[in-house]
Amino acid sequence: MLNLGHWRLLAATADTGNISRAAERVGMTQSGASQAIAQLEASLGIQVFTRSRKEVKATALGAEVIEHARAMLSHLESIRALADASRGLSRGRVRLGSFPSVISTLLPPLLRSFGQRHPGIEVVALEGTDEEVEDWLAQDAIDLGVTLNPAAGRKALILGRDRWMALLPGAHALARRSSAAGVTLAELAAQPFILATGGCRVNGASLAREAGLTLSDVRVTVRDWASACALVREGMGVAVVPESTLPADLRQLRALPLTPAARREFGLVRSATGRQSAAAGALWKHIAGGAAGG
């Protein structure tokens, strides 16, 4: 069954002439976008686009379909603008704080789609450490904040969970282990270590401390997970990183789960001001729908 996502993707593909860029614009993966276009063409029973190595172009009949799709989307935005105005959402500003690994990966497609749905609401995204985000929430400096391992009583909207992984050079002795066996923090603590923090207080060093261990040979400390992965690939040491931050290309690398398993979760929390803001409430509801859909 066709939905609004199909028609938005159709218009974006016509605008960009490229499925990858269109997918990025509407918050989809390239493979998902290709499947959606194929589904749309099969449902209509016509070819909307011709594809070549250089570009994607609309067929003559496809151009007419796209024109009607744009008109439909325009009318929908007008209806939503009218509904927003009736609820005091025609204009507004939301301050959203997050630590780097979420603000650069999970949030961008959700914020793009929110902007399409509520063009009159400005979202100001602020990047900080998880401790800074907690301070901003406490001081009402932001309306919404992404926090790490939120306490059960905070009424957080959980956005995701992942495991902590040991990241090893491919030639490392521990890299021969099976995934089922995993690696202990004790085995990693004495190794040359690349300490990545991701802008968060919970990282390889804090996990070691909680286990009563000390990282005895920290070679480099970096904030960015990608930098840590690159240094491990060069054989400079081992690292502990969240599973969601692992690079797509694991050549010359080996990722194994920590044992016993260690996990983290991140959730959206409202400040006192955010709980009173209609605009912040609209963004909360939109992100909740996106997180559930993911």
Image (cartoon, helix red, strand yellow):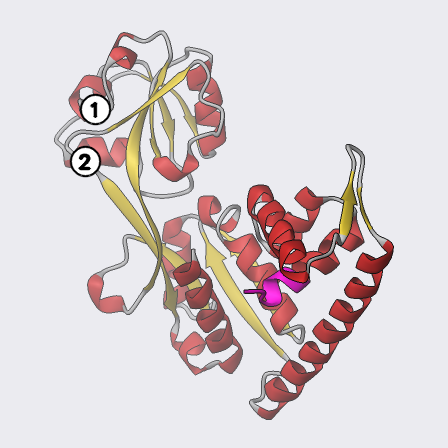
For label 2, count other residues whose C-alpha is less than 10 Å away and answer few (under 14), some (14-19) or many (20+): few
For image coordinates 58% across by 88% down, the residue present is: 88
User: Where residue 182 sits: x, y (%)?
Assistant: 21, 24
Q: Is residue 286 visible?
A: yes
Q: Residue at x 17, y 29 (%)?
A: 259
Extreme residue in the left direction: 212
Identify the residue at the far front of this view.
45
Q: Quadrant of residue 219?
A: top left
The residue most toward the right is: 60
Residue bearing mark 1? 182
Indicate which disc, 1 or 2, sits on the residue closer to the N terminus: 1
Structural crowding at the residue carrying mark 1, measured as other residues with C-alpha within 10 Å and reported as few (<14), some (14–19) or many (≥20): some
The answer to whether residue 142 is magenta is: no
Which of the two residues, 126 or 234, is positioned nearer the viewer here? 234
Tell me where residue 60 appears, x and y as whole percent: 87, 56
The amino acid pointed to by label 1 is Gly
Q: For mark 2, what is the residue?
A: 261
Compare residues 184 and 70 and report the one nearer the observer: 70
Please name the residue shown 62% across and 60% down the image: 43
Magenta stretch, residue numbers: 1-7
> Whole-percent x and y of residue 160?
35, 52
Instruction: Pick the quarter of the image with the C terminus.
Output: bottom left
User: Are dots 1 and 2 in contact, CB under 8 Å?
Assistant: yes
Query: SS class of the residue under badge 1?
Result: loop
Whether residue 136 is visible, yes or no, is: no
Q: Answer with left or right where residue 125 lies relative to residue 294.
A: right
**Could you tell me the amino acid type at mark 2?**
Ala
